[in-house]
Image: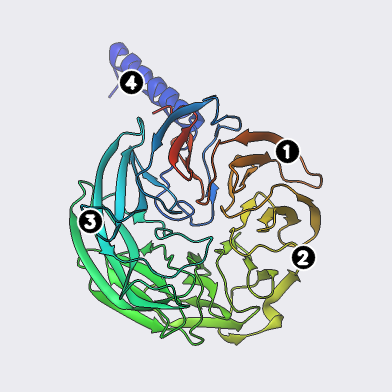
């Protein structure tokens, strides 16, 4: 049957409009949520384009909004759609004689605080001077927010404060859905455990100087699904990354005197490498071939590891290693073929990731606590004094911008919906103008 002219014309017009719509959609930059520690892939990378590279928090240049954050903490912001969440700790007051660890919710577009939900009201634990009482970063699946705190048995200035890990789920209206106490936790340097999500699980690292563990809870009920003991029982604060490698899901983390991989569905250990040091903070990254990590205390190392392994492994799986200018707290980031590392003392380095060839190393700041992020082939390095340098990785150091925030920063940036979000010592900043 032949089509009539009007029908043929209408069909052609519809096809042209569909083609135009598809072309425009393909040209639009991808927008991502930043739903957990270090973003959608847990490695500090963003696939978004046109992320701001210049601003000034003191003058307000390219600052969409700036709002005060109640309490204090090093918890980094997470973003899902128009919702932004972070953790904080409110000091004791006449109304409440003990400190309150809380979850805060803000509007991404305006910075307006929507609500504040107390999770743990308790005395303060012993911690390191560079830690806080609200350092973990929450995680969200778009329906609920998952977080963890320490509930100390009592206030203590002694070397170790005993207590319990508390994990909670809160809905987007601020209502607590469930709270669980999956294990004991002895605080020496303080508490910082950021949940990661896998399928229907909330997974939390409980490395500490006691009966250390990793535990997985059901997202809906909070019931324990699996709990795996950690062999060396040593404090560390690493959030794992989860990747599917050659058909096998691996949850990889350093900490507690080793680097190890687990099946995130069951908690079964897949492989373990002893060392290279005792304590770890920075999260690893993965480029599709190797796992890269920087650590730790008392010795500092940067390693590239082949993760396709089973059982106990050793140096045969180390692709390259250096002990120069390695970081302890800041997590590294990949930008294209390069690995960027910031050392706590203010030195930054760029490596060809897979070969380990050093491209450059320079003193870039006074001190680094925040982890690095990257977008559009650029790396963002944020120092504790609020100075962020935007760097184009390559054989030669190329700093394309230096930006003042105007206050100290100990949390890590989030990138979402065309904007940067930074939690300073006193304020939360939205940088750049969102197109949504």
Q: Earlier in the sequence, mark 4 or mark 2?
A: 4
Q: What is the quadrant of the N terminus in the image?
A: top left
Residue where numbered disc 1 is placed: 399
Residue 240 placement (x, y as % from top left): 48, 67
Residue where numbered disc 2 is placed: 324
Q: Earlier in the sequence, mark 2 or mark 1?
A: 2
Whether 284 is drawn above or below 142: the answer is: below
- Residue at the (66%, 62%) spot, across then down: 327
Q: CA distance from mark 4 to mark 2?
A: 65 Å
Q: Earlier in the sequence, mark 2 or mark 3?
A: 3
Decide which of 256, 129 is in the foreground and name it. Answer: 129
Q: CA distance from mark 2 to mark 3?
A: 48 Å
Q: CA distance from mark 3 to mark 1?
A: 48 Å
Residue sticking out furthest to the front: 94
**Badge 4: residue crowd in 10 Å (few <14, some 14–19, many ≥20):** few
**Badge 3: residue crowd in 10 Å (few <14, some 14–19, many ≥20):** few
Residue 287, by quadrant, is bottom right
Colouring scheme, one of rainbow, by chain, secondary structure, one colour: rainbow
Q: Are marks 3 and 4 in contact (CB under 8 Å)?
A: no
Q: Earlier in the sequence, mark 3 or mark 1?
A: 3
Q: Earlier in the sequence, mark 1 or mark 4?
A: 4
Residue where numbered disc 4 is placed: 11
Name the element at disc 1. strand
| Mark drawn on residue 363 | none
Residue 301 placement (x, y as % from top left): 70, 70
């Amino acid at each position: 049957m032949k089509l009539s002219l009007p029908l043929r014309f209408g069909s052609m017009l519809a096809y042209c409009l569909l083609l135009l719509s598809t072309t425009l959609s393909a040209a639009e930059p991808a927008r991502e949520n930043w739903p957990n520690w270090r973003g959608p892939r847990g490695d500090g990378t963003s696939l978004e384009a046109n992320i701001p590279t210049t601003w000034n928090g003191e003058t307000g240049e390219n600052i969409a909004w700036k709002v005060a954050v109640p309490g204090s903490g090093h918890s980094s912001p997470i973003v899902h759609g128009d919702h932004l969440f972070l953790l904080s700790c409110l000091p004791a007051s006449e109304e409440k004689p003990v400190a309150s660890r809380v979850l805060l919710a803000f509007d991404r577009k305006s910075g307006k605080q929507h609500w504040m939900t107390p999770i743990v009201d308790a005395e303060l634990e012993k911690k390191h001077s560079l830690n806080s009482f609200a350092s973990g970063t929450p995680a969200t699946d778009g329906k609920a927010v998952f977080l963890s705190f320490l509930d100390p048995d009592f206030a203590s200035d002694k070397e170790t404060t005993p207590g319990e890990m508390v994990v909670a789920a809160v809905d987007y209206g601020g209502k607590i859905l469930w709270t669980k106490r999956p294990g004991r936790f002895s605080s020496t340097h303080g508490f910082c455990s950021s949940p990661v999500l896998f399928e229907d699980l909330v997974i939390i690292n409980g490395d500490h100087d006691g009966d250390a563990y990793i535990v997985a809870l059901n997202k809906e009920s909070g019931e324990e699904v699996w709990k795996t003991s950690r062999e060396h029982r040593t404090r560390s604060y690493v959030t794992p990354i989860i990747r599917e490698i050659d058909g096998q899901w691996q949850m990889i983390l350093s900490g507690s005197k080793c680097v190890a991989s687990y099946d995130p569905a069951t908690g079964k250990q897949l492989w373990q490498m002893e060392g290279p040091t005792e304590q770890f903070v920075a999260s690893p990254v993965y480029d599709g071939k190797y796992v890269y990590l920087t650590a730790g205390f008392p010795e500092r190392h940067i390693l590239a590891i082949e993760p396709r392994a089973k059982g106990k492994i050793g140096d045969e799986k180390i692709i390259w290693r250096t002990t120069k200018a390695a970081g302890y707290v800041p997590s590294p980031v990949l930008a294209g073929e390069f690995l960027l590392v910031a050392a706590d003392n203010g030195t930054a380095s760029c490596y060809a990731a897979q070969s380990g060839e050093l491209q450059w190393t320079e003193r870039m700041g006074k001190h680094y606590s925040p982890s690095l992020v990257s977008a559009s082939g650029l790396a963002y390095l944020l120092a504790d004094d609020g100075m962020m340098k935007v760097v184009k990785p390559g054989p030669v150091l190329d700093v394309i911008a230096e930006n003042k925030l105007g206050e100290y920063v100990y949390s890590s940036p989030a990138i979402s919906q065309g904007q940067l979000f930074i939690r300073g010592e006193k304020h939360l900043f939205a940088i750049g103008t969102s197109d949504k």
